[in-house]
Image (cartoon, rainbow, N blue to C red):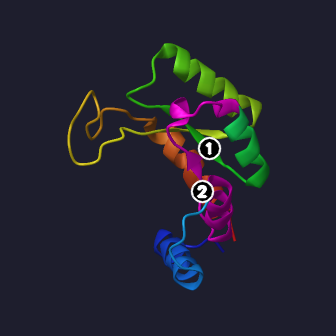
Amino acid sequence: MAMTKAEIVERIYEKVEKDGFSKKDAAEVVESIREAGGVSSLAHAVWYKDPDGVVEELVERGLDAIEVFHPDHGESEVERFSKLARKFRLLSTAGSDYHGIEEKGKAPGSVTGGREMLDALERLREGRP
């Protein structure tokens, strides 16, 4: 039976409490999210020096999705990350990168992925132990 969102968050916090608040690399974070029954998405891949290499490494550790739609992404970045998603069979995600202050197109609702994207993420999460 799939866990609820609250149960997943509780499981993540239990793991953090047990392991402590240490800085972990992205691969460890991806594994922890999967172990907790969550779905991981790599955000801000455009900012990495070697996004393709990062994605390939994280896919080996269980990465589920990549942020394709973001205010900093032009058409070429959307196409690049869409191709990566297809290549590694990842879900595509969207994010506004809003952190409380509106800047350069980063505002609530400025980037949306649609109902299909959310449904795909939910189906994946529901299939997790």
User: Of the residues shown, which amino acid type is indicated by label 1?
Assistant: Ala
Q: Which residue is drawn at 23% across and 33% down?
A: 103
At 69% from the left edge and 39% from the top edge, which residue is drawn? 55
- Report if the CB atoms under discs 1 and 2 are less than 8 Å apart: yes
**Residue at the disc numbered 2:** 39
Q: Indicate the position of residue 44 as horizontal and vertical percent values.
A: 50, 37
- Please, what is the three-letter code of the amino acid marked with disc 2? Val
Q: Distance between the residues labelled 1 and 2?
A: 8 Å
**Which quadrant would residue 39 be assigned to in this image?**
bottom right
Query: Residue 72 occupies which quadrant of the picture?
Result: top left
Determine the image quadrant of residue 42: top right
Is residue 69 inside the magenta stretch? no
Residue displayed at 57% across by 47% down: 41
Q: Please report the residue visible at 49 percent of the width from the left and 72 percent of the height from the top.
A: 9
Up-down: is 48 above or below 3? Answer: above
Q: How many marks?
A: 2
Between 24 and 44, which is closer to the camera in this rendering? 24
- Residue holding disc 1: 65
Q: Residue extending furthest right?
A: 60
State the extent of the magenta-drawn residues as a range: 26-52
Q: What element carries label 2?
A: loop
User: Under tag 1, what secondary structure?
Assistant: strand
Q: Is residue 29 magenta?
A: yes
Q: Position of residue 10 (x, y in %)?
A: 49, 78
| Residue 16 percent coordinates (x, y) | 54, 77
- Please rate how many residues cluster around mark 2, counting C-alpha atoms within 10 Å: few if below 14, some from 14 to 19, many from 20: many
48 sits left or right of 111 in the view:
right
